[in-house]
Amino acid sequence: MDLRERRVGARHQDKVDVAIIGAGPAGLTAAYLLTKAGKRVTVIEKDPAYVGGISRTVEHKGFRFDIGGHRFFSKSREVVDLWNEILPDDFIERPRMSRIYYEGKFYSYPLRAFEALWNLGILRSALCMASYLRWKLFPKKEARSFQDWTINQFGAKLFGIFFKTYTEKVWGMPCDEISADWAAQRIKGLSLGKAVLDGFRRSLGLNKKPNDGMETKTLLESFRYPRRGPGMMWEAARDRVVEGGNTVLMAHALKQLSQDAGGWRVTATGPDGDRIIRADHVISSAPMRELAGRIHPLPASLPQALDLKYRDFLTVALMIRSPDLFPDNWIYIHDSKVKVGRIQNFRSWSPEMVPDPDLACVGLEYFCFEGDGLWTSSDADLVALATREMGLLGLCDPAAVEGGVVVRQEKAYPVYDDAYAQHVTAMREELEAAYPTLHLVGRNGMHRYNNQDHAMMTAMLTVRNILAGHRQFDVWAVNEDAEYHEAGNEGEAARIARPIEDDARAALGSVRAVPRRLHAA
């Protein structure tokens, strides 16, 4: 079997139980679980070579690039077990280190209290604390934007130092135009008091707890990672789907989606023309905006869907003749003098990502919109920009750069602007009412900033709903927050969600209990 056959699948299937749009973490998780359940599945993926979506691993002359940096950590035991099942022998344990670069100095992330106080200076530190107390005592009553929400939580001074510059680089808009939903989801559960207390513990080396005579490491110290990048996981999942007799169609993009008495008709266009797939169910991880424009007849919520926005980004990987330049997995760049937002050190993710021991390989991430000046710049110009900015930051001698390559990623982040929530709600409500066998999953499929494991959770719950024959779980209840990925124990949650019936019973019990409590009062 040649490479094309292996990627496409061993047999041609026109009638399947489930058609899946997109071979990212959500799509391939669903395909793998449905294959295990004995269902006929076809996955369509528009990329001609890579599966995994933003979690793919790109290879160039033996160098491997992770598109964004993907730690394999989840509090969900079911997610961890699935990772171990798909990729049982290829995880390595890696030390975690990341820092913030601000005004020529490095700050550990999460913060170390003594280090932060020293770097900021006594006066600025005092002003930060005074600003924090001022906003805690007199917060904005209605926090409508990311800026409002973050200032209420941390004060204006800390917002300006550790949030504003980087956030505006990522999203390409002022912080007061970003929805407060973004902050509530990504920074929820974090507090300045907890950060300071944890910083003191880290500074004094007291953040490890004994357990049966051993020291237990949390996410703050280490994480698991596939030895040759996250793409290993999704390539293995694809192979299991194909080995199970199902199909993964590469280089095929969704052209049209329609429904008739016979079920779904999925038209995918590829290098050999159109291919028609008939299916009882469709699982889509395609961007909401793209899906809406391909459903026939066009949904009434199409105008709202077309207003959904996405942030794209690109990685410029530089090969540098030097020992490893810094020990971090990545560095956040809070500096307005350069355009780069974050810098990955690929060898720190895994030594096998970099084949030459005499070369360091780093990836400079630039956040942009598809079609803007950065996105349309030539690869040579982008390599020159990245080389120049490494020198400006003092991270390497530009003369030591021996080469570079550019990897572009469209629709990396769904944008949380003022109107996104109502647009998503309008489309979700219409599709759920009109098409109960169409299921939205994943980051772009639901226009939610899901982490990799959360995207998998949405697929796992969707598969359970399909196998049960009814909506047993609320996929939209899967959420994410920053605290989830900064602390806690791997696999500590026994299951990923409660059935809707359990929630309904719990709610009913609370309602019934209210009169008794009122009567007793």
Image (tube, rainbow, N blue to C red):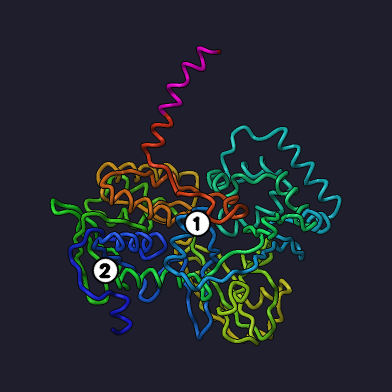
Q: Position of residue 422 (x, y in %)?
A: 42, 41
Q: Which residues are magenta?
A: 508-520
- Residue 304 percent location from the top left of the image: 37, 47
- Majority secondary structure of the magenta segment? helix
| Residue of label 1 | 451
Question: Is 179 placed above or below 321 here?
Answer: above
Using the image, tell me which numbered label, if any, was put on residue 183: none
Kind of element beneath mark 1: loop
Q: Residue at x 25, y 54 (%)?
A: 281
Residue 244 versus residue 310 in the image, above or below? below
Q: Position of residue 406 (x, y in %)?
A: 52, 76
Judge whether residue 178 can be spotted in this image: no
Q: Nearer the viewer, residue 409 or 198?
A: 198
Name the amino acid type tagged 1.
Asn
Which residue is identified by label 2? 246
**Residue sitting at the far left:** 261
